[in-house]
Amino acid sequence: SQQGEEDPQALSIQEGENATMNCSYKTSINNLQWYRQNSGRGLVHLILIRSNEREKHSGRLRVTLDTSKKSSSLLITASRAADTASYFCATDLGRGQNFVFGPGTRLSVLP
Amino acid sequence: DAMVIQNPRYQVTQFGKPVTLSCSQTLNHNVMYWYQQKSSQAPKLLFHYYDKDFNNEADTPDNFQSRRPNTSFCFLDIRSPGLGDAAMYLCATGAGYLSYEQYFGPGTRLTVT
């Protein structure tokens, strides 16, 4: 069964609005990472948050981690059309073989 | 620029005909991963190498094999492709296991006819 699951599966917003995506997972983790994938391309790393961290920022991105609820959220502020992509969370149990991606959230930012 | 390169970007093979996908990296990373991604699905880890040590996921079919002749190169061999093996195959590298991000190549889209 999947370790990480994103919510919602698809999200459509207007340019300038904020987008929030959530990820839930099942077992204890070493860290959680968020990746972006543009259509038909490889994945690009966005943010890594360790299990002892609660929040991280990178530009317009804000990630939170709640280990008690086994959940994480990715907030993209002031979205742009170029943010249109699929966003995946991935959980890392720290043993290499357990790097598991959630099903992803497809974000559409309309101009 | 340091990067992960996959060749070819598009590969068409016939049912049952062996095919090899290649990946190279200039990052000098210890770990190289192979993922399979089907349409609108998450990438699924097939196996990875930590240096020369091969680590297979439990549910990876025997039809999929891999070779890593040196630090820079890693190959994915599909011995007898079936129609269900049509997918995007992604190669990724990582500096290590703990708390390291993965760097992905652009992928090879495999079509099986």
Image: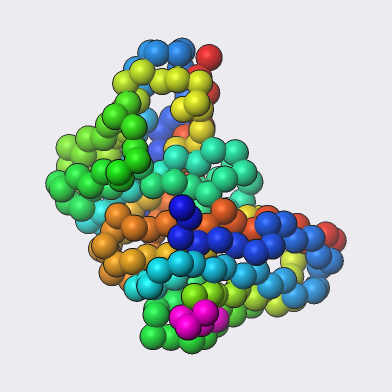
Q: Residue at x 44, y 30 (%)?
A: B8
Which quadrant of the structure image shows residue B22?
top left
Image location of residue A92, percent across then percent down: 37, 65
Q: Which residues are magenta?
A: A64-69
Using the rendered image of the protein, determine whether residue B16 is visible from the camera's viewpoint. yes
Q: Is residue B18 above or below residue A106?
A: above
Place residue B17 in its image quadrant: top left
| Residue A34 seen by the camera | no
Which quadrant holds the C terminus of chain A?
Answer: bottom right
A30 in the magenta segment: no
Placement of A17 over or under B40, stated as above or below: below
- Where is residue A70? Give x, y as percent: 49, 75
Foreground residue, A36 or A2?
Answer: A2
Q: Residue at x 50, y 41 (%)?
A: B37
Count of numbered marks: 0
At 65% from the left edge and 64% from the top edge, which residue is drawn?
A: A7
